[in-house]
Image: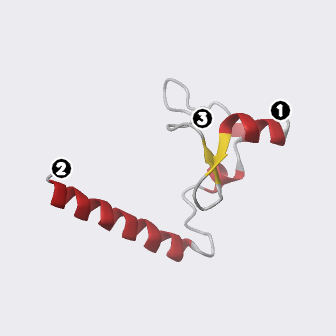
Amino acid sequence: MKPQQFTEQFLQLDEENDYVLKSVPCTFLDADNYCSIYEVRPKACREFPHTDRKKFQQISLRVYHTLMQLLYTQNRMGWK
């Protein structure tokens, strides 16, 4: 499969203009939750959880901030 075909079939742009999978969980997980394309998986999957990236601290803070917003909303709304 050519990269353009892969992009069109399985990816979409998010609000930050990054490519993300169209479906969650990943289309390529098999019934046992193992990657069915492990040997040729995309770079983002190979590098997961991205802790060695230069901007990991910025990403971590963004995730933390988002999580705190969700927890705050959950508490305000009384969700369990």
Q: Secondary structure at mark 2?
A: loop
Q: Tell me residue 27's x, y (percent).
A: 59, 32
Dot 1 and dot 2 residues touching (CB under 8 Å): no
Picture layout, residue 36 above or below residue 11: above
Judge the density around disc 3: few (<14), some (14-19), many (≥20) Cα neighbours within 10 Å: some
Residue that numbered label 2 is attached to:
79
**1 lies left or right of 70:** right
Residue 21's image quarter? top right
- Marks 3/2: CA distance? 33 Å
Q: CA distance from mark 1 to mark 2?
A: 44 Å
* Labelled disc at residue 35: 3
Horizontal and vertical percent position of residue 5: 80, 35
Residue that appears at 18% across and 49% down: 79
Q: Secondary structure at mark 1?
A: loop
Which mark, residue 1?
Answer: 1
Label 1 neighbour load within 10 Å: few <14, some 14-19, many 20+: few
Query: Label 2: how many residues lie within 10 Å, few (<14), some (14-19) or many (20+)?
Result: few
Tally the numbered discs. 3
74 relative to 4 in the view: left or right: left
Query: Horizontally, is 47 left or right of 62 in the view?
Result: right
Query: Which numbered disc, 3 or 1, marks the residue closer to the eye?
Result: 1
Question: Residue at the location (55% across, 33% down)?
Answer: 34
Quarter location, residue 53: bottom right
